[in-house]
């Protein structure tokens, strides 16, 4: 089967995701929109969730650009941690269901590889992105990436190492829980901004409580 058809299926699913919950998208709906059969879809993807994962990567483009800017502009580990969470919260609450699927769904371990393959299929979409940075950065789960930054903050003296490990888990669990609280209302006017702001308030309060200096 041609790569063009695989690209078409990804783009078709992406357009559906802009309007519908991932839970409401069916294989037959995608097949009808792409003018093909379900059999064709299964020749390119393991299952429906696998296809939705690929289509969801397109929602990461602006976040990846923002993330690279945050990392390039912040040398202090704690500042970088806070700004990385701010960027993640802003983009995640705008597309809560898609981000939940990407970072907590059943294929989360394959996110880095999926991103790499996605940008082989759509090379023009790299824009200002660093392909190596992107694929490597997303190769670990969000808990591992956050723990790495927290460890750097502890090495700088902001936290004890024991508390840094606990804090990292608390931050990730707190974020996921709040994101799920907004899962059914993030599309309503102002709710995405409200959720992101609430998380940052909670994060700053948590950091302030455990911060040594």
Image (tube, rainbow, N blue to C red):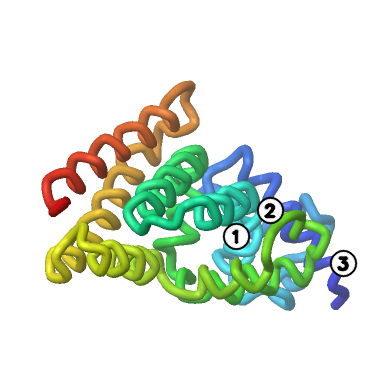
Check contact, mark 1 vs mark 2: CB within 8 A: yes
Marks 2 and 3, Cα distance to the nearest angstrom? 14 Å
Q: Which residue is mark 3?
A: 4
Which of 79/112 is in front? Answer: 79
Q: Is residue 55 left or right of residue 78?
A: right
Task: Say whether disc 2 or disc 3 marks the residue closer to the N-terminus.
Answer: 3
Marks 3 and 1, Cα distance to the nearest angstrom? 17 Å
Which quadrant of the figure has residue 11? bottom right
Q: Which residue is mark 2?
A: 13
Task: Say whether disc 3 or disc 1 marks the residue closer to the N-terminus.
Answer: 3
Helix, strand or loop under label 3: helix
Marks 1 and 2, Cα distance to the nearest angstrom? 7 Å
Q: Residues within 10 Å of mark 1 (few under 14, many from 20)?
A: many
Q: Which residue is mark 1?
A: 52
Q: Residue at x 32, y 38 (%)?
A: 200
Which of 14/85 is in front? Answer: 85
Q: Which quadrant is home to the N terminus? A: bottom right
Q: Is residue 93 left or right of residue 41?
A: left
Which quadrant of the figure has residue 196? top left
Where residue 180 sits: x, y (%)? 33, 45
Q: Residue at x 53, y 70 (%)?
A: 111
User: How many labels were placed on the picture?
Assistant: 3
Compared to residue 29, the image places residue 191 above or below, namely above
């Amino acid at each position: 089967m041609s790569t063009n058809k695989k690209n078409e299926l990804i783009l078709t699913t992406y357009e559906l995701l802009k309007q519908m919950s991932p839970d409401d998208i069916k294989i037959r709906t995608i097949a009808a929109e792409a003018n093909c059969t379900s059999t064709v879809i299964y020749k390119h993807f393991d299952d429906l969730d696998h296809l939705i994962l690929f289509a969801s990567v397109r929602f990461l483009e602006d976040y990846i650009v923002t993330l690279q800017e945050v990392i390039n502009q912040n040398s202090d580990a704690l500042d970088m941690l806070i700004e990385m969470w701010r960027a993640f919260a802003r983009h995640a609450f705008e597309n809560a269901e898609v981000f939940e699927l990407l970072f907590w769904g059943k294929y989360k371990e394959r996110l880095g590889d999926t991103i790499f393959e996605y940008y082989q299929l759509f090379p023009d979409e790299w824009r200002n992105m660093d392909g190596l940075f992107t694929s490597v950065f997303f190769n670990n789960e969000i808990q591992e990436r956050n723990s790495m930054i927290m460890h750097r903050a502890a090495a700088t003296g902001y936290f004890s190492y024991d508390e840094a490990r606990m804090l990292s888990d608390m931050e990730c669990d707190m974020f996921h829980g709040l994101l799920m609280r907004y899962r059914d209302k993030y599309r309503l006017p102002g709710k995405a901004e409200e959720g992101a702001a609430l998380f940052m308030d909670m994060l700053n309060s948590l950091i302030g409580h455990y911060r040594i200096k």
